[in-house]
Image (spheres, grey):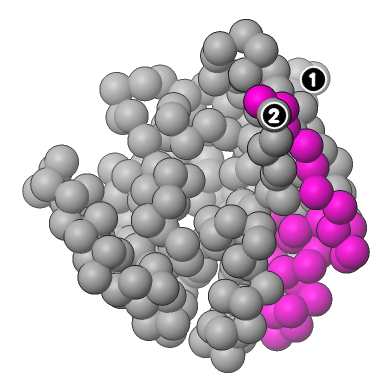
Amino acid sequence: MIGIIGGTGSEGKALAVRLASIGDEVIIGSRDEAKAKAVAENIRSKSSKFKIKGMSNFNAAQNSELVIITVPYNSQKNILNEIKSELANKIVINTVVPLIFKNSKVFLSSVTDGSAALEAKNILTNSFVIAAFQTISSDQLIDLEVKVTSDVIVCGDDLISKRSVAELINRMNGLRAIDAGSLYNSIYIENLTCLLVNINKVNKVNSAVQITGI
């Protein structure tokens, strides 16, 4: 069972669709449980094979074996502190990037801990925090008719957890996990994501990352 915290947003819904399409059971979490249930029902309507339900963020964290964080950066601290007790000893995939949109431009907010993923790790001291999925467009992921060909850069300090996340990614058609080392390197992934968003805005595309030579 995979829980998506903040799953009613664009990234959360996109990952829910992709995960459900490969047979995973998914819980969409939200601070508004009614909204989570409505989004889950809408996604289920796309295919009778999709196993998706909606819950509060707390219940989604409690009932999931692996959790994906897709909340806006400015909500991350509060939400993680609310559910941290339910995330102990679990793999937590952090997709959060502290982007700022201003005057048609995109900037990266300064994070005291270095990155959103490192901040998450400092809050979730009893969880296995892995950074992944930051550089993939939700517009591509949510449309199953679109063939997504992209590498997913994965950072983390626990090798077994990182291997589990890589296996999950590699099951998703068109995606390939690339081990980028320790969670500290999430600093560079978040910077790269900001660059990609700006590239997308300038060129009106959905760019992706592919690492050659590996």
The correct choice, above or below, for 168 with respect to 90 in the image is: above
Q: Which residue is mark 1?
A: 213
Q: How far across and down, in percent of the image, does residue 21 sit?
A: 29, 43
Q: Earlier in the sequence, mark 2 or mark 1?
A: 2
The residue at the point 72 percent across, 69 percent down is: 120
User: Is residue 136 among what the camera can see?
Assistant: yes
Mark 1 and mark 2 in contact (Cβ < 8 Å)?
Answer: no
Give the alpha-carbon distance from disc 2 to disc 1, as whole Å.
38 Å
The residue at the point 70 percent across, 85 percent down is: 126
- Observer-nearest residue: 137 or 112? 112
Q: Amino acid at mark 1?
A: Gly
Q: Residues within 10 Å of mark 2 (few under 14, many from 20)?
A: few
Q: How far across and down, in percent of the image, does residue 28 sit?
A: 35, 63
Q: Residues within 10 Å of mark 1 (few under 14, many from 20)?
A: few
| 205 relative position to 9: left or right | right
Q: Is residue 117 magenta?
A: yes
| 203 relative position to 62: left or right | right
Q: Which residue is mark 2?
A: 103
- Observer-nearest residue: 200 or 152? 200
Q: Which residues are magenta?
A: 104-131
Q: Amino acid at mark 2?
A: Asn
Q: How far across and down, in percent of the image, does residue 90 sit?
A: 58, 77
